[in-house]
Amino acid sequence: MQPPDCRKAIADSEPSYRSFRHLPEQQRWQWYENAKRIRQGREAAGIVMTETYDQFIARLTRELEL
């Protein structure tokens, strides 16, 4: 018997980073790296994101105006 699939999809769970647009560019790049680490941790924990990684990166750079 196979164990149940404990992964779960998270819909629209990614936070918006728009509120950091006002920060200096160096700090926005730090938030970019931080956001990638957060996502990597979620994926490592078995959480399936509904947004592909490429979509996530595109949104992140758009919201942070990078």
Image (tube, rainbow, N blue to C red):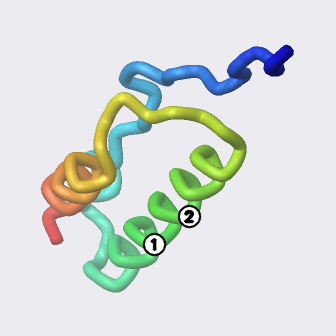
In which quarter of the view is residue 45 placed? top right
Q: Is residue 12 left or right of residue 48?
A: left
Please state which of residues 55 and 28 is positioned toward the viewer in this rendering: 55
* Residue 18 placement (x, y as % from top left): 26, 46
The residue that mark 1 highlights is 33
Label 1, residues with CA under 10 Å away: few <14, some 14-19, many ≥20: few
Q: Is residue 60 above or below residue 12?
A: below
Relative to 32, say whether 14 is above or below: above
Mark 2 — residue?
Answer: 37
Amino acid carrying mark 1 in the image: Glu
Q: In which quarter of the image is the N terminus?
A: top right
Which image quarter is the C terminus in?
bottom left
Residue 64 against residue 2 in the figure, above or below: below
Picture quadrant where residue 37 is located: bottom right
Q: At 66% across and 52% down in the image, what residue appears?
A: 44
Q: How far separated are the C-alphas under marks 1 and 2?
A: 6 Å
Residue 63 in the figure: left or right of residue 13 = left
Circles 1 and 2 in contact, beta carbons < 8 Å: yes
Closer to the camera in the image, 11 or 8: 8
Local secondary structure at mark 2: helix
